[in-house]
Image: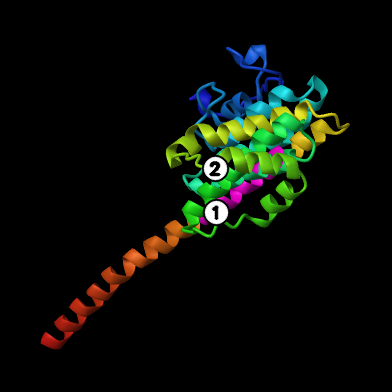
Amino acid sequence: MRQNLPPDWVPMLSRGRHRRPTKGACFMELASFLAGERWSDHPACTHPLLATLARTVNDQMSDGGRQRLLPLVPSVIGLTCEDREVDVRLALWCATSALPVVAEETQRVLAVGILAAERRLAEIEGRTDGVLTERSARALADVPLAAEWARRFSLGLTTSAAGFHETGAPSIVCCAVLGVADACVPDTEDRMLAMLAAGIEIVRVGAAREQRRAEVGEVTRALPRAAAGAHVRERVGAGA
């Protein structure tokens, strides 16, 4: 059928959502188009949090700068996984990347987000030591006032795992991108582009790790079956 053939016309990247390709496309709508999925800015072919990052970066770029995102679109097609650690590491990367240049109020918000993400990462890794990753520790050390405010604010604050993944991580990612877009630095678009490229790599690594775990699990499950089969053959041979 026609929808399974490669498209011979591609919509232009533009800001916001679009009802149809003839009106333009955001980053993720174009991904859905190229993947042959139903037209959507939330396609199934891409990791949900990465899609949030891509949509937000798309909308904060200038019309000219947005076209620099085009080479990245194919790399998000089929890039997804269920590893919850990916959400945490993607949120941490965005927050720590944005922290040095965003306004003071946004620094406070992102610092709180970093501490929340670090707590969630510790839960996933089964740690209770309270030690931050090196990148987070460096980022917070560079903004001591915001970091101290965030620590005081976070005292006694608890977030469920579901709450972090459903609302916390997306909020951190969006806050980071919006903060960079409004930052008083000359290279905001370069920073947003780099943030998206790094996010794609984080999900790629996570998906590969998930695939390796699945393969190891399959081998582990197959070993008892193989051993049982060998035992049966041995008994049959002995009886003969």
- Which residue lies under the disc numbered 2? 155
User: Percent position (x, y) of residue 20?
Assistant: 59, 13
The amino acid pointed to by label 2 is Leu
- Residue 95, relative to residue 224: is it above or below? above
Q: Residue 170 appears in which quarter of the rendering?
A: top right
Q: Where does the C terminus fall, quadrant-wise?
A: bottom left
Foreground residue, 24 or 191? Answer: 191
Q: Which of marks 2 and 1 is nearer the N terminus?
A: 2
Amino acid beneath label 1 = Ala
Measuring from the top left, give residue 80's x and y in whole percent: 53, 42
Residue range in magenta is: 195-209
Q: Can residue 203 be seen in this view?
A: no
Q: Which residue is drawn at 62% across and 48% down?
A: 202
The overriding secondary structure of the stretch rendered in magenta is helix
Question: Dot 2 lies on which element?
Answer: loop
Q: Name the residue under label 1.
A: 208
- Distance between the Cα atoms at labels 2 and 1? 36 Å
Q: Which residue is drawn at 48% across and 33% down?
A: 166
Whether residue 121 is visible, yes or no, is: yes
Left or right of 177 in this view: 113: left
Q: In this view, does 48 lie above or below 233?
A: above
167 relative to 133, above or below: above
Which picture quadrant has residue 223? bottom left
Residue 10: say if magenta: no
The residue at the point 73 percent across, 36 percent down is 71
At label 1, counting other C-alpha atoms closer than 10 Å, the crowd grade (few under 14, some 14-19, many 20 or more) is some
Where is residue 159 shown, x and y percent of the image? 47, 39
Give the residue drawn at x 68%, y 57%. Answer: 134
Answer left or right for 213 relative to 148: left
- Residue 131 position in % (x across, y down): 59, 58
Q: In this view, does 123 lie to the left or right of 145?
A: left
